[in-house]
Image (spheres, rainbow, N blue to C red):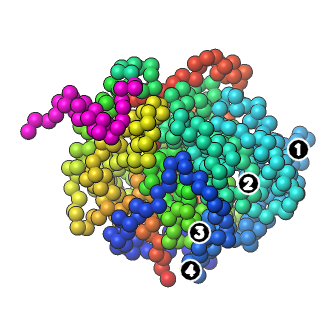
Amino acid sequence: MGDGSRQPQDALVDRRSFLVRMGALSAAAAVGCTPVGSGSGAGPAPGRGDVPVDGSPADVGTATGAGAGVDPRAAESFFRELPRPDLSGAAPTDSAEFTAWEAGALLRDGRLGALEHTEAYLARIRRWDGVYQAFNEVTAEAARARARALDGGAAEGILHGIPLAVKDNIHTAGVRTTANSHIFRDFIPDRDATLVSALRGAGFVMVGKSQLGPLATTRALTPDGEVTTVNAWTPGNPDVSPGGSSSGSATAVMARLAASSLGTQTGGSITMPSRAQGTTGLKPTFGRVSLDGVIPLSYTRDHVGPLARDVRDAALVLQAMAGEDHRDPRTLGLPPVPDYLTAATPVEEGGRARVRWDTRLGIFPDWADGGGDGGQNRRAFLREAESVGVDVVEIPVPDGWDELTSGAFNAIRLVERAEPFLPYMKDDVRLMGVTLTSFLSGLFVSGDEYLKGQRAKLALLRLTLEGVLDRCDVVALESHIPFDMIGLPLLALPVGIREMGGVELPDGVLLGGAPFGEERLLAVGTAVQARTDWHRRRPPEPSPADEAWLRRPGARGRLDLDTVAREAQ
Amino acid sequence: MNYPSDAELDRFIRTRLQLLGIDLSVLPEEDADAPADQARVVAAVRRLLRDQMPVVSDFPLDPISVPPVLYTSALSGRLHG
C-alpha cells in the first residue's frame, strides 16, 4: 500500500542523530535575531537566485531558498490532474467559493481571470467586512493592479492569481504593518518579508492585512482591548472567540474574503483559530519558513503557516514560501523543502482514498473517550482515518510530559517578548495597551530559570521522540503547547460541528508530526478530506439582525488585562 | 526562611522596574476600565513569581545530559545518506 517510490521526509530524518547533536548547537543558536519594527533594512529581498545553495541529498533534494522547493514539473502535474469545478450550472458561480487549487486550475485553463477572481473577493470584503472586521487594511487597488498584471502573463507560479490575506505582523512593502499595536500604528516597511517575496514570486495577490490580537498575543482586539474580529460562524455573537491571534486570517478564509491566509503561531495562533472556525491550519516545523520581516513575539517559538480551506490549499501556500533564507539563520542547514503538493494529493486504491504512506496515528488514553459532540467527532475522525488505512494505536503519556508542558515552563517564552519590547516599555508602558502584563512579566524570569526552560525543551524533545513518536508517526494532541515549545509541526483539521451553549461551531482535531513531518501530516489530512465533507462546510452569511446589532456602539465588547494575560499566546 | 509577603514582592517588582527605567506610575493605580493599571499588573507578576517560577527552578534536570537548546528543529538537519 501507499507510495513506494519515495519516503516522506520524516522517515529520512535521523532521530538518533537529532538527539546526539542537541548539545552542540545550543548557545550558538542565539544569533541573528530579527529587529523589532526597524527590520526593513535597505537592500533587495532575497529571491530564488540570490540565496546560497548548499548540497542537498539526492534522494530528497530540491533547490533551496524560500519558495524554491517548487518543482515546476510537479506543480504542472499537480494542476493538470486536479478535478475541475463544475461550471455548467445556470447561475454564475461565485469564484470566491472555489478552493485555491480549484481556482488555480481554472486560472491555468484560462477559464478564470486573476482580476475577475480578485474582484469576487473584493466584492465580498466590501459587502461583509464591516461585520467580520477580518482585515486591518484592505489593499483593493494594489490587488487589482497586481491581478491585471498577472492576467497579462502566463500562469506559471503555483499561486498565480490567488487572493490571500497576510497577517498584519508580517512586513509588506509600502503597506502598513501594525501588528495591531500602538507601537507600529504608522509603520510602513520598505521591503517585504522574505516569505511575502516568495509568495509574490509564486503569483499571489494580496487583498489585505488580516487582523490579529495586539502584537499577536490574543484574539483580535484593538490595542486597548475592544473586540474587533468576530467568529465567521457567529458574527452576531462577539463573545464567541474567533480564536487567536490569527483571528482575522481564519475569519477571512471561512467567510470567503480570501482564498487562504497567512498566520503566525507562538502559542497556538494558527491552530486555535483553525479549530475555532473550521479552517485547515498548518504550523510547519520551526525554521521551515523564514521569520525575516515578521514582528517577533518569541525568537524560539514563532512560526508562519497557512490557514486554508483544505489540506491541498495549505500545501500550496507552504510550498510557495518554505525554504532557506540567508536573512534568517534559523532556516539554514535544515533538510531541503520536499514536494508538499504531491503529499497533499489524495491517492486511491480500488476507487477508495488511501493514505499515501503507511502511517500509525497515536492517541493518548482518553483522547477519544469524551462525551458529547466533541467525543463523537473525535471518534468519527478516527474511523475515517482507519478507513483510509491509518493504523490507530493507543500510546501512554510519557512520565514527565505533563510537567514539562505545564504553564510554568510555557511561561519561559515571556522572556523573549520582554527583551525586544523593553525599549518601548521604557518609553511608555501604555504603548503595550491591554497586552502589557505578558510583556512585563518576562522581565521577572531570571537567567537561571530561562536557561532551565531551554534545557527543559531538550528533555521534552527526547520524551517526544523516544516516548511518543517512536510508537507512531503522527500523534493526536489535546494542546498545541508541547509542539510549539519544541518546534514540531502541527496540523489542525476540521472534523464536524459541536454545540456549545446552544451555538453550533466547528470542531477540529490537532495532529502533531515528527521533525519535518509536514508531508506525513498533509498525506493523512488529505486522505481523510477525500472521504469527508467537514472541510467544505461554511457558515451562512451574517443576518440583517447581526449587522444591526454590531453597528451599536460597544456591541462587540472588550477583554480586560487579566483575561488577555490568561489567554496570552 | 519566611516566604516574602505580597508587600515585599510588590516592592521587589517595583524596584526591578525602576532599575530598568520603566515608569509604572503613568498607569492609574487601580482602574478596572483602563487597559492596564498598576494593581493588576503587579498582581500578575506576583503570581508568576510565586506560583510559576518555583516550579521551573525546582524541576530536576541532569546538568550533564540535558544541555540547553534554543532551536530544537535546527538539530534535525542531518538526513540518512
Q: What numbered label is drawn on residue A525?
A: none
Is tag 4's residue or tag 2's residue first in the polypeptide sequence? 4
Residue identifier under label 3:
A337
Q: Residue at x 56, y 77 (%)?
A: A54
Q: Is residue A286 above or below residue A239?
A: below
Closer to the observer: label 4 or label 1?
4
Does label 1 or label 2 sit earlier along the sequence? Answer: 1
Residue A215 visible, this orientation:
yes
* Residue A25, quarter of the rendered image: bottom left
Residue B20, magenta (yes or no): yes
Q: Which residue was labeled with disc 2?
A: A204
**Does label 3 lie on the same chain as label 1?**
yes
Label 1 crowd (10 A; few <14 / some 14-19 / many >=20): few
SS of the residue at dot 1? loop
What segment is highlighted magenta in the picture?
B1-27
**Pointer 1: what residue?**
A89
* Image coordinates for residue A311, horizontal then vertical, percent: 63, 55
User: Which of the chains bears the disc numbered 4?
Assistant: A
Instruction: Give coordinates of residue A171: x percent, y percent.
Output: 61, 49
Front-lying residue, A445 or A302: A445
Give the spatial CA distance, label 1 vs label 3. 40 Å
Taking depth in this image into account, of A311 and A291 the one nearest to the observer is A291
